[in-house]
Every structure is written in C-alpha cells, then in structure tokens.
Image (cartoon, helix red, strand yellow):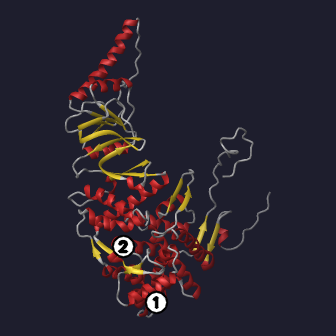
Amino acid sequence: MALHVPKAPGFAQMLKDGAKHYSGLEEAVFRNIQACKELAQTTRTAYGPNGMNKMVINQLEKLFVTNDAATILRELEVQHPAAKMIVMASHMQEQEVGDGTNFVLVFAGALLDLAEELLRMGLSVSEVIEGYEKACRHALEILPDLVCSSAKNLRDAEEVASLLQTSVMSKQYGSEIFLSKLIAEACVSIFPESGHFNVDNIRVCKILGSGVCASSVLHGMVFKRETEGDVTSVKDAKIAVYSCPFDGMTTETKGTVLIKNAEELMNFSKGEENLMEVQVKAIADAGANIVVTGGKVADMALHYANKYNLMVIRLNSKWDLRRLCKTVGGTALPRMTVPTPEEMGHCDSVFLSEVGDTQVVVFKHEKEDGAIATVVVRGSTDNLMDDVERAVDDGVNTFKVLTRDKRLLPGAGATEIELAKQITSYGETCPGLEQYAIKKFAEAFEALPRALAENSGVKANEVISKLYAEHQEGNKNMGFDIEGEGAAVKDVLESGILDTYLGKYWGIKLATNAAITVLRVDQIIMAKPAGGPKGPKLQGHWDKDNWQDEPETF
C-alpha cells in the first residue's frame, strides 16, 4: 500500500491537490493592483484624439485596428480575476452611456496605483476605502456645479452636430466635423415626438471604396444584396414580407405518387405550376408589388413573380427582416398567404443601386420622419470602416444620453482639474487618516489630462501646472489645447469641447466602485482547473501537403 504523505500544515491542508492560494498585502492586494495597472497602462495610450491605435488579433484571427477601449477589451478576453473587475466596470459604462470606457480604465488604474502608495506608507486598506468613498460622494456632489452649458434644442441638426464632435473626435480625429454632421442628421430625422430615442434605429452600412468624406445618410434602409428577379425599381411600393421561403407549400405528411404514363407526369407538374401561379397572382392582386423573403426563392416562384411584375428581395438575416418591417410598417408572415392591406408595408421608393462596385437595395422614405435611418459609410479598407462605424456608434450613444440629460461639462481635462482642486481642499478639512486617501483620489483625476498631454507629445507636468494656475484664478472652463503649440491651454466652452454630464457621472462612480472592489480582496483561492479531455492537436498548418511538417510560426 502506498505511503500516505501528510500535507503541509495551514490553509493548503483543506484544499485539493493543485489548488493555489495567495493572501495578505504582498501576495493578494499588490498583485491585483499590478494587474489592473498593466491593463490601464495598455489603454491609456489610446485615450483622447491623439491616442494611438492598438492592433488586436482575436482567437478567430480577425484583425482590429482601433483606439476604442471597449472593442480592445472585448477582443482581449482578459483572464486575471482582478483585471476582469475593471473590465466589467468599463462594460457597464459602455451599456449605461455608450462612451467613456477608457475614462473608467484610466481613472480606476490611477486610483489603484495611488492606493498602493498609501498602503506601502502604512495605511490600512479600510482607511483607504473609506477615504475613496467619501471623496467619490463629494465629487458627485460638486459635479452639477461644474455644468457649463446644456443642449437647448435636440431637433436642430447644427446644434446637435457641435455637441457630438467631442465624442467622434476621440475616434476619428480630422473628420469629426463631417461625421458629426452626418450622425446629427440621422439622429434628428428619426427622433420621435415622445422623446424616447432608440439607438438601434440608426443602422450603418459599410461599402468599400472612395473615402470617408463620401459617406452619406439615407432615410430608410440599405442592404448589400441584389434583387432576385428582373424588376429593379418600384415607386410607391406596397411590400409583402415573408419569414418563410418564397416557394411552393410542402405537405406535412409524406406521400407516394404513382405515375403510370407521360401524360400523368405532365399533368402532375402542371398542377404544381398552376398552384404556384395562383399564389403569386393572389399576392399581386392584393396590391403588393414587392416581395421580401427570409428564405430561398424557388425558380418557379421567381418566374411567376417576373410575369406579374413583382420585385423579389431575399434577406438572410431575421434581424434585418424585423428591422425592415419596422421601417416600412409591415408584418412578417410565416406562410405564403395573401397579405391583408394592414399587413403590407409601404415605402416611397425601392430601387437597386450601385455604390462603388457593390450592388445595394435601398428602401427610401422621402419624408424625414422615417422610423430608421442608415449611415452609408465609405472607406478604403475594412478596418478603417469598422473604426468609423465605432465612431458613429459613439456619436449616436451621445445623442441618446443627451435625450436623457441635456447638461454638459467642459472637456479636455477641465472638469478633472477642477474636481482635483476642490477635492484636495475638501481633504484638508477632514480630520482622520482618510484625508490622505481623499487627497490621492483628487490626484488620480490628474491622470486624465496627463494622458491627453502625453499622447499629444507635450510635457504633462507643464500642462497640469498651467491648468491648476488657470483654475486657481477661477477659470473653471480652461482645458488642454491639443492643437496649440507646446503646453497650451484654452477655454473649452468657446471651442465647443464638451462632455456629457451622465458620461462623467457614471464614469467616476463605476471606476471608484471597481477600484474599491479590487482593494477589498485580501485572499485569492484558486481551485485546480477541471481537467477535461483535450482535443487532438493539429500538426502543422492546415494547408501543408504533409502533416508531419513543422508547424509554421505566424
């Protein structure tokens, strides 16, 4: 019988073999802080208009070239449990506001970095957390006093475009004026009277070729498909939408047909043809002149559709089908039945067009108050168009935030420096040990203008001292001037660099919560991973003639 080897005394005795555990400040807290700092450092260089792009290749070998923190994190698949908490906070920011994910990461990283200094000085974790919580509450109380303006009329495309410029600028620096006008036009055209704006109603269609400045907005929908039949253009369209294939009905039960001679065979196929013709004719007689189907189109059905002058369009995606129904006001029918006038959709014009060398079908509403608008994005490469699409998404989300709260804060680091100044003076008035944590919380705000300056290649210390000097004189709206020579500052309200109030509010709240959650952890216990069956290893590259060859290193 094998000899029983006793385990080492202590915590390891209770766990299975292979389990790991880390505890105490050195092993758990500082390790977690280090992981979060690394993550924040990665995305920090992508902050602001002059942020650098990251090239991320995900597990499916799809390439992303972007400075959008939300996309970078989504594709990175972070494994470290503490870093995951920071990632979750930025995902929450993405869902809540749709922009400002990098703000959360940089700010949370700075908070943890400064917390590490405090802990090494000898403060206890609970004192740091208490100080951070007090400072966060105070910051959110001051925030409404820093509001410098608010959106007056969200139905004025010119005004909306100027408000969207800041969020578009951080993704597409250089073409922000053109893009924000496009987004504003799209948003204003579908903004309902009720004031409930749905982000999903702005679609993006990416078509390769030309340049970003050839992009345009259409009221209606654009699909990168060709029409199935001969008819390529219909004015004042009545649309029948089917979620089933445009084909003859198949019976539920299986049957065997015994055909004795050629005549019976002719009659059999003729019966099928007649049935198909009757169905298509009935659809045409109901007043429909376009059929949109979610499945395949049979040759026979297409022949009769051409005969009765029906335009046939096939959409593979059921989501596209639903959105189309929403745009044209139709109902998707599950079977090939004749549509009633209520079930049919209506559209001013539907036509096949060519953009670049791509065939597209356009459902166009002449009136401005359509339910859906489409931004047609042009660009020289797929990566560029993906990045423009992300900029459009951010712009649309900013519009959505403005419909909920019209208040605006000064951008370009002005809000952060003002908060830092006021929280520092608040820290002076606190008697306990948490005053150190409150002052460090204020210092963490400096990380954002510092990142803006460093990414623009300017000395960050100069910029921050100039900003503090201006704010000390009472100029609350002075921010970092990216376009200026050296460490320049300017009045950001006059320049129109404005951030949404909700974006900042949630950013500060979520980043602080994430940092505190990471600090609260004092022990990490990891069970041994379950050892499931391993898949067969592929030898070499899939395109090799001989599988025994050395695998290529990519």
Q: Nearer the viewer, mark 1 or mark 2?
A: 2
The amino acid at mark 2 is: Ile
Whether residue 388 appears in this view of the structure is yes
The percent position of residue 543, horizontal first and vertical second, equals 66, 41
203 and 278: which is toward the camera:
203
Q: Which mark is residue 435?
A: 1
Whether residue 403 appears in this view of the structure is no
Name the residue rendered at 29%, 36% in the picture. 233
The amino acid at mark 1 is: Gln
Quick one: label 1, few (<14), some, or many (20+) residues within 10 Å?
many
Q: Is residue 325 left or right of residue 72?
A: left
Check the image and report above or below for 435 versus 316: below
- SS for dot 2: loop
Name the residue rendered at 22%, 52% in the picture. 369
Name the residue rendered at 76%, 63% in the picture. 4
- SS for dot 1: helix
Q: Mark 2 points at which residue?
A: 497
Q: Which quadrant, please, contains the N terminus?
A: bottom right
The percent position of residue 12, horizontal first and vertical second, equals 67, 69
Count of number-bearing discs: 2
Farthest front residue?
485
